[in-house]
Amino acid sequence: MGPAATPALQEAAPPRAPALRVAVATRGGLIAESVAALLREHGLDATLHQAQGTVRWTAQTAPHAVVLLDELGPLLEPTIVAARRDAAGVRIVLLARLADAAAVGGAVELGVHGLVDAQAPGHELAQAVRDVVAGRRILPALTAVDGGAAKVALSSRQLDVLRLVAHGLSNQEIAAELVISVNTVKFHVRTIFRQLGIHNRVEAARVWAEAPPRASGRRG
């Protein structure tokens, strides 16, 4: 008989890297729960915390990232300060219901590592968290649109809504196109009209036709 067959050596699978740990700080509500669930769906270890609970959590676990909702209102700045003080190296991302120039300016002033539009899909939010952990600063690109007396900076979401309004779509059609609620579309339309100083969809179409937008801002 020949020599016994040697069983094929199997390469050991490389160990999986632990999921990035994220604390979602909130005063409570379905939005925060949805954010945490979205992050978990995209491979992040996301847990929900009250504002002060988040500070204790960061001190105990030194997480890779903290997602702070702008719903925290007056608690936002002290929560950021406390998280930085108690967990060296913590990365902070803000969710903004309206990621406009004012929100970007506020994020820069607070010195956070990222700002994400709260209407962004889950994979974009998860990627933003991964990017800030990798050392990049994430701020939404803003686009300059001629508002008459001055240039107005619109977020990419606002620009999408303005484009579809200018092309004659109804609020319901815009909601379906962008996969957002009709109420969110109405909110964006009111905000865009106020920022641009216009009053109806005809004026919106004129602005879109006469003032080609120019992108500005940065990611990374």
Image (tube, rainbow, N blue to C red):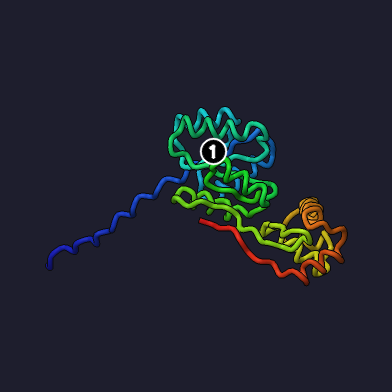
Q: Pick the quarter of the image with the N terminus.
A: bottom left
Dot 1 crowding, Cα within 10 Å, few <14, some 14–19, many 20+: many
For residue 159, which quarter of the picture?
Answer: bottom right
Relative image position of residue 145 (x, y in whole percent)? 72, 63
Give coordinates of residue 200: x percent, y percent.
87, 60
Secondary structure, mark 1, is strand
- Residue type (three-letter) at the residue carrying disc 1: Ala
Q: Is 164 placed left or right of 70 in the picture?
A: right
Going by the image, does 144 lie left or right of 125? right
Instruction: Please tell me which residue is depicted at 46% across the width and 42% down the height of the picture.
Output: 64
x 69%, y 36%: residue: 29
- Name the spot of residue 56 as percent of width and height, x first: 51, 28
Q: Which of the 4 image quarters holds residue 193?
A: bottom right
Farthest residue to the front: give it. Answer: 149
Residue 184 placement, left or right of 71:
right
Q: Disc 1 designates what residue? A: 23
Identified at 46% across, 46% down, the residue is 19
Q: How many marks?
A: 1
The residue located at (85%, 63%) in the rendering is 201
Please tell me whether residue 68 is drawn above or below residue 201 in the rendered image: above
Quick one: 216 or 98, which is closer to the camera? 216
Q: Position of residue 206 (x, y in %)?
A: 82, 69
